Image (cartoon, rainbow, N blue to C red):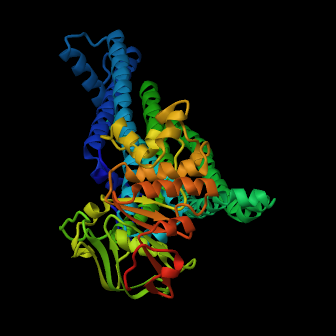
Amino acid sequence: MSPSSAPKATSTAQARGALPMVRAFVQAYPGRSAAAFVAVFIAGLMDGLGMSMLLSMLTLTTSGAGHKASLPEQVATRIATFLGLQPTAPVLLALAILLIALKAVLTLLANKQVGYAVAHIATDLRLAAIRSVMAARWSYYLKQSAGRLSNAIATEAQRASEAFQYSAEMAAMLLNSLIYLGIALSISWRAGLAAGIAGGLLLAVLHVLIRTSRHAGQHQTRLLTSLLSATAALLAAAKPLKAMAREDHVDALLSDQMKQLRRALRKQVVSREALSAWQEPLLAIMVGIGFFLSLVVLQMPLAAVLVMLFLLARVVSYLSKSQRSYQQIVVRESAYWSLMDSIAAARAEVEPEGGTQTVQLSAEIRFDAVRFRHADGRLVLDDASFAIAARELTVIVGPSGAGKTTLLDLVVGLHRPEAGTISIDGVPLHELSIREWRRQIGYVPQDTVLVNDSIAYNLAFGEEGLAEADLREALQAANALEFVDALPDGLRTLVGEGGCRLSGGQRQRLAIARALVHKPRLLLLDEATSSLDAQAQAAVIETVQRLKGSLTILAVTHQERMIAAADRIYRLAGAQVSADPAAGQPKRSLQA
């Protein structure tokens, strides 16, 4: 299975509810759903035939020779005769045991198919959510909460996949109840009909608890999204909170949402347990009434009454279990629809692929009369014209908040200008294949992102096809090979959470090596030295100086040594870009 096999994202105008959700699962996974249903169906038939064997055995040992055999007894006798066996009590008992055991095996096979489907659903939904968000416009991504995305991927996908499991359980229970009801009707249609009506009344009376569970599940989904968003933000600020002895305020900030979530969970548990608590006594009452009516009113033989009571009890029991499964489905359906809404919203904001042309960045990147403003209306560039020459170090300086990082985003194609043209070697950026263009870019952000894994993994990010020689070459170019080889485990050294086992300069040089591992033609440095001490800054700047002339480097910085090493310097201020000889001693500058 692949994410494309996952249930399709739907619009808010389409039907919602448990049944549309189950239908979407079946349509997305028809093979496994069909296999599970067929196995459950055959298992139910085996169970029904086993009960028919037991009924035949019981009536054979308790009734006289003139007893009129019921349909189940006739079926059991014919099966035994077809197998070349005499339909005696021991033979019928042995066949019953065999059929019931076969039912258990088939049930296991059905559950295995359901388990596989649940695992695939959870994985496919997570991948679909991740890929839809990553394929969306950068402006859409910036508006998303990290906590909401984490909740969708971790919690909502899991809850949605569990809904499929309970759907399969409900289908199995309903199928078994129909089979047993059919056997009961073949013995006494009046008693069977009464049992069916009683089971329906039982479900109707207790349906109010299903509605309570649905509301609790919807509230739980909303609260989990809000709570995880707030928690992610507070955990990101853990260090300053502890440094200022304000970590106790986290409880106050989250306590209200925690209390609401606790109430929602309590309602969910109470409704679930209430359903279970009421079903058992009502089932006992129905069995007692059925015993009285069958034995006294209908005057059925005692053996037949015992079998009927067993069959009818199973019918009502299976119906009760199916209702409990349905309750679990409705608790989880809100998670499914919330996740589908997130995927649909992201896919509606899919990033345009651009054109089909490709370039190799051999001449320049040029801005011609470019105008760009953020969604909040803040103007970043106004009729800006300048050039970034290939194989040179170009530095962008300017006050904080002027839009220097946004300028890099425009080069990458994460933003599109509202007026003017950005061109690469004379080809407008919107005519280029945006993915092919980005494959030529190495990007080093201000804050290095390292995961708690080996240096090799952090350089390749799990991408296959990169040999150790490729990693070492990138480390050499980033002036990081010497310190990596000095580590006890070399490339296999674990960097710790966020790279905590390495110094700031080492982390940043690894970030540069990661940007260089695919041999880019353009290297973007976004304040790559701003959070480093003087020694670490010097190491990174030395690395940049070594790279000069081998590729195009565009850097946003306030660091004087980086500015002094630049071939071209531009100042961005007040939405205007200008050559800035006052910012340092540039080798050359172009008129804006």
Residue 307, placed above or below residue 166: above
Residue 485 seen in the current view: yes
Say whether residue 461 is visible: no
Which quarter of the rendering shows the N terminus? top left
Residue 375 is left or right of residue 438, and the answer is right
Residue at figure coordinates x 56%, y 56% from the top left: 538
| Residue 105 location (% of width, % of height) | 36, 24
Residue at x 43% of width, y 34% of height: 311
Q: Quadrant of residue 232?
A: bottom right
Determine whether 367 is above or below 491 in the image: below
User: Which quadrant, please, contains the C terminus?
Assistant: bottom left
Which residue extends farthest right? 245
The residue located at (42%, 71%) in the rendering is 408
User: In the shown orientation, is residue 295 left or right of residue 533?
Assistant: left
Q: Position of residue 19 (x, y in %)?
A: 38, 57
Q: Nearer the viewer, residue 574 or 173?
A: 574
For residue 152, side relative to residue 44 (left or right): right
The image shows residue 478 at horizontal and vertical percentages of 44, 49
**Residue 144 image offset from top left, x and y in percent:** 49, 68
Number of marks in the image? 0
The foreground one among 333 and 56 is: 333
Depicted 196 relative to depicted 205: above or below: above
